Image (cartoon, helix red, strand yellow):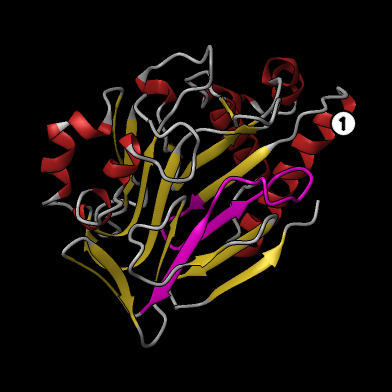
Amino acid sequence: MELVPGAPGLAFYMCRFIAYLGEPILLSSLVTDPDHSIIHQSYHSRERPEPLNGDGFGLAWYVPRLSESAALFKDTTPAWSNENLRQVAKVVESDCIFAHVRAATGGSPVSRLNCHPFSFGNLTFMHNGLIPEFGRMKRRLLEGLSDETFDSITGSTDSEHIFALFCEYYRGGGLQAMIESLRRTIARLEELRAELKIQRQCFLNFAITDGNVLLSTRYISDGSELANSLYYAEGEKYRCENGVCMLERGRRSSVVVASERLSLASEWTRVAPNQLLIADREGHLELCPIQV
């Protein structure tokens, strides 16, 4: 957590992420090639008071012909100094990619188990934000989980517990079921915050995929512009040249969602607070309000 100078109690919370769904691209197109790649964001974040996100990283990518579940690569080392990350990124190609760099909340262990993304079956999830006073909320959240989703939790982050709650609500059924499960997850977190009389707000920027559809949220409890930043770009084909990444105009079939724009020279749309972005492989993309 970092406090904004001159604004006591006002916090902008950790981590940066990128999600991609579309035509197959190399992981390096997100990880290393853009002038504001996820590696660059790990040591020079532009939209956090504290620029470092050095408490580990994670990648997830789908290869549908081999498995319906994502492959995961995580480490607790900073993304900027991990040579294995660079080597993997330049030879692996996928049409659905998640990338995350972590800045741990005070007191949260830096361990591989706490690195995003998290997976369960064919689902993959990552989070930028915070549940305030999560220690008080944790017991009640766990009470609502089945043995299966309870046992899926291996780390200690609020993020992984949020994902378990989502998985508890989602038992398959496609896009509409995913949307409703996400809505119920946010509603339950806000319900617990109200029951416990927690005054601080939830910061809930999520990215969730089953490898075929992508959901992403920009959410804060009061709906204000204090919500953590989130952008998207859409187009027919993603490419990155000389540090500038862009999606060529044409039939919409690819989308990139990112905590921060990957290059200032290309076109990005800022997601409004308390909006849900929905994208699929057919090129459909829409934004709708999050109602809890």
Position of 45 relative to 148 (above/below): below
Q: Residue at x 39, y 41 (%)?
A: 45
Magenta region: which residues?
A: 208-235
- The residue nearer to you, when weighing 197 against 52, is 52
Tell me, yes or no, whether the highlighted magenta stretch contains residue 228: yes
Q: Position of residue 54 (x, y in %)?
A: 34, 27
- The residue nearer to you, when weighing 179 against 9, is 9
Helix, strand or loop under label 1? helix
Q: Residue furthest front?
A: 6
Residue type, mark 1 in image:
Ala
Q: Position of residue 266 (x, y in %)?
A: 35, 70
- The residue nearer to you, when weighing 26 against 199, is 199
Q: Residue at x 70, y 44 (%)?
A: 220
Q: Position of residue 116 (x, y in %)?
A: 42, 34
Q: Residue at x 44, y 48 (%)?
A: 122
When asked about the image quadrant of residue 258, the answer is: bottom left
Tell me, yes or no, whether the highlighted magenta stretch contains residue 137: no
When asked about the image quadrant of residue 247, the answer is: bottom left
Q: Residue at x 68, y 51 (%)?
A: 225
Which residue in the structure is indicated by mark 1?
194
